[in-house]
Structure formats: C-alpha cells, structure tokens
Amino acid sequence: MNQPVTRRLAAILAADVAGYTRLMGLDEEGTLAELRALRRELIDPAIAGHRGRIVKTTGDGLLAEFASVIDAMRCAVETQRAMLARHSASTPQDRRIEFRIGVNLGDIIFEDDDIYGDGVNVAARLEQLATPGGV
C-alpha cells in the first residue's frame, strides 16, 4: 500500500547564476571560488536569517523553502541588493556573478527532505524569466 503524500503550502525560492556556462568557460576556478564565497558569506546567511531552509543545490543554483512568502521575498531582495553592492566598478560586467531569482507561494509535496510539485515548478519557471540581478 502506498504511503499518503505529505503536502503543505510553502514559499519557494529558486535561484540560478545567469551565464554560468560562459563564466566557467572564462575562469572555472575563479568562478567556482567566487560562487562558494557568495554562498558562505551572503546567500546561506540570508536564507537562514529569513527563516528559510536550503532544500537542494546544483552547480550554479539552489532551491530554498520558507514558511512565509514575505520572508522569501525579503531574502530575495536582500540577496540581490547585497550582490549589487559586492560588485565594484573594477569588476567587469562580463565577469560578474549575477543571480536570477524566482519566488512562488504554492502547494508542495514533501518527501525525504526534498520538495516537489507545481509550487516548485512555478518558482523555477519564474526564475528563468527573471533578468540577471532580478526577482
């Protein structure tokens, strides 16, 4: 007999580095080091500070869950503002790491510390539509 599916309403934040393949082609080690530093210094603390939880990461992106859409949006805006402040005029535009972020409030399926469903899919689609540096 199948186990019942566990569903809940959650705010999902999907983030991805715009132009990641191009950046890796220019400087793999530098891009990876900067991305790790951004996660450690900026992104992970912002998610935790807004009571979110990182569900999964990919090479250039992540998926986070929040109980509140307000917390998710504040985290997204804070992250993008901090990213903008981090880039100095001396960093060439074509070398900057810029995130696209999508946020969606929707029904999700929770299973084995992972999340699935339309709530997640819509957040990922919104992220793809965001401009680099946008939400």
Image (cartoon, rainbow, N blue to C red):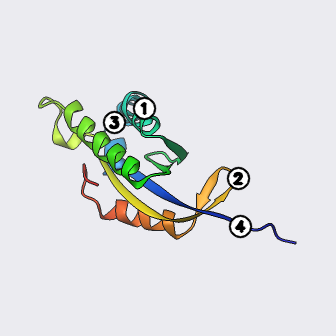
The residue drawn where x is 16% and y is 30% is 88
Q: Looking at the image, which residue is at 11% across and 31% down? A: 89
Query: For the N terminus, which image quadrant?
Result: bottom right
SS category of the residue bearing label 1 = helix
Q: Earlier in the sequence, mark 4 or mark 2?
A: 4
Percent across and percent down for residue 107 are 54, 67
Which residue corresponds to mark 1? 45
Work out how far the residue at label 3 is from the one at label 4, CA to CA, in angstroms.
44 Å
In front of the other: 17 or 110 = 110
Q: CA distance from mark 3 to mark 2?
A: 36 Å
- Residue lying at the far left in this picture: please name it: 89
Task: Kindly report the distance in space between the C-alpha atoms of the residues bearing marks 4 and 2.
Answer: 11 Å
Earlier residue among tags 1 and 2? 1
Three-letter amino acid code of the residue under disc 3: Asp
The correct choice, above or below, for 46 with respect to 60 in the image is: above
The residue labelled by disc 4 is 5
Q: Which mark is residue 27?
A: 3
Residue where numbered disc 2 is placed: 112
- Whichever of labels 3 and 2 marks the residue nearer the N terminus, that label is 3
Q: State whether residue 21 appears in this view.
A: no
Residue type marked 4: Val
